[in-house]
Amino acid sequence: MEQLVQKPLVAQSSNLKEPSPRASRRENHGLRDFHWRQRFREGAIHVFLAVNGYLAIVLIGLIFLFLFKEGFHALQTIKPMQWIGNKTLDFDGREVFSFVWQPLSNTPKYSLLPLLSGSFLVALPATFFSTLIGIGCGVYLAELASQRTREILKPIVELLAGIPTVVIGFLALSVLATLVQNFFHTHFRLNAFVGALGVSLVIIPVIASMTEDALRAVPNELREASYGLGATRWETLSKVILPAGVSGISASILLGMGRALGETMIVLMATGNAALFTGNIFSSVRTMTATIASELGSSAQGSEIYYALFFVGSVLFTITFFINLISEVVVERMRRRLRL
Amino acid sequence: MNTAAAIQSDPCKIEVKSLQYFYGKEQALFDVSMSIPDKQVTAIIGPSGCGKSTLIKAINRIGEISSDIRIKGDVLIDDASVYGKSVNLVELRRRVGMVFQKPNPFPKSILENVLFGPKLHGVSDRGRLEEIAENSLKKAALWNEVKDKLSKSAMELSGGQQQRLCIARALAVDPEVLLMDEPCSALDPIGTAKIEETIESLQSQYCIVIVTHNMQQAARVSRSTAFFMKGKIIEYDETEKIFTTPAEKLTEDYITGRFG
Ligand SMILES: Nc1ncnc2c1ncn2[C@@H]1O[C@H](COP(=O)(O)OP(=O)(O)OP(=O)(O)O)[C@@H](O)[C@H]1O
Ligand SMILES: [Mg+2]
């Protein structure tokens, strides 16, 4: 095939001083053929990857749309005030303003406050514990551990992130709850604190590995500069490396908090699931996620409670969306600051 | 190896004694001996990978922070071994400042960069700190360009300014020796000229060792020059002699660009 194309080509070009347009087209033929095939292949790969990339955006957009569309239905029948609290009669027949989530009572009550307080009463302490341990772990892995130790420790930390949450929930419910009760003599065996401990187990690896990444991204030149000026290991860590990695670390904390707010199975199993509006960390609580998970399946599609649960979902989505957005911005700022 | 009597007669600051340097199993320096005089500039030249950086990193022991290394032989500063058991690394590195190949300012303000060292070493008086900052920046020929924006981030400076900031930062801890590893490799001719001026103005006060790939630069700034190849010192003599009448064929081939 190639020879067929090339043979007349040689003969022709030796006859003509300037190749005719036709000849030059011929001359390019093999090359152009290859060119087109390559163009096509690369184009196809490009399209395939682009579709995958945009698919993520489209999916998020669809979820967003669906969630908010359904959530907005709830706004048509449930008044803004009702999301906060309801007037109810207490035992003496006096009218009081109460904050309860009881969508199934005769007069359904949709106060979001117990769910919000429940979510944050779990997520904030969980973020706090995992920040302490996760950052410690990340700093150790990135800066202090020897090569050997790191090679052993890191997979173990990552393994922790891979444990099914139902297993952690089970552990929290059976072991942690007992320990906490024995130690703090709590009134409720299952409470926000137990839930927070359980959730921490999932968040610690997130924060640890992101902290490690952030510190490893700090250029080695900065370490050399610091040691070169006579800094000790601790001075280098505290005055150069941690400040340089601080945005990445903060981002990991925010991301961890987003995960904590969205965590469902562990809180469903370990927090006692009583929708109480409280600030007491040793009280049973119920988070937004647990509420949706436990009630949506048993509510009729299109009912008021069905839409109300979607509204709860929209609120949760909005909160975690903004937390993640902030953490993205923070990481971007770090990149620019370090010129990575 | 050839060492002129002139170099040996100058007061010696750093004495490298039969130094062998190993990265793990790989040997990077073979039996290197040279005495580096005080209060002048000594250049180190040689093809890439010949061990120039290794040698100067051996002097302030910065090589060992990121690699697993082993040495034989010794390095003496003012007749005291830097590899002795009781050596205080903090003190050693305060006395031996280093400027790296790539400008590496901290992502902090210009002032914080300069004062990083002095603060580490316990200077806390504000007046004194301001004085140190101004003096160091002046010595590094950067003061006029940055005096109105000391609190700006060092990352906003140009490459050449960053490198002079790194010089100022090294000078701020009042070192006796200044090691410079290709300080101009990332700079344009103007930045290079500025750094060379800076080096010239500093040479009467410090023992300066500069690694460079630039023959003209070595010829311009240094009093003596050492030529290295494959981890060995080939020739070490007064710069003028090295560049006009080298004793070794290898040196001549290298400086005339016959290999490199
Ligand atoms: N951290 C390290 N670990 C292992 N080997 C190293 C390390 N640093 C340098 N080497 C090796 O030691 C030898 C000398 O390297 P060195 O960096 O001192 O060369 P150089 O003369 O500074 O070169 P260049 O001009 O390219 O900077 C090289 O063979 C290099 O591969
Ligand atoms: Mg080098």
Image (spheres, rainbow, N blue to C red):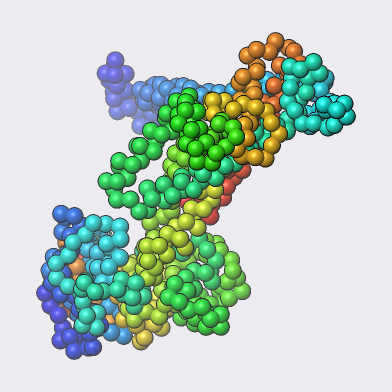
Horizontal side of A64 relative to A13 (left or right) equals right
Left or right: B182 in relation to A317: left
Q: Residue A247 in the image: x percent, y percent?
A: 54, 50
Q: Residue at x 48, y 53 (%)?
A: A245
Q: Nearer the viewer, residue A72 or A98?
A: A98
Residue A135, given in percent of the width and then of the height, sits at 46, 48
* Residue at 62% over, 26% down: A273
* Vertical arrangement, residue A31 with respect to residue B32, above or below: above
Residue at image coords 81%, 22%: A78
Residue occupying the point 38% across, 33% down: A159
Give A116 or B10, whichever is nearer the viewer: A116
Given the current orientation, which residue lies at the most extreme top position?
A: A300
User: Percent position (x, y) of residue A281?
Assistant: 61, 39
Asked if one can make out residue B134 in the rendered structure from this viewpoint, the answer is no
- In the displayed structure, A71 sits above or below B95; it is above
Where is residue B238? Give x, y as percent: 22, 81
Q: Above or below — where is A20 with respect to B55?
A: above
- Figure quadrant of the N terminus of chain B: bottom left
- Residue B88 can be seen in this image: yes
Between residues A13 and A278, which one lies in front from this camera angle?
A278
Kindly give the residue lying farthest to the right in the view shown.
A94
Q: Quadrant of residue B147?
A: bottom right
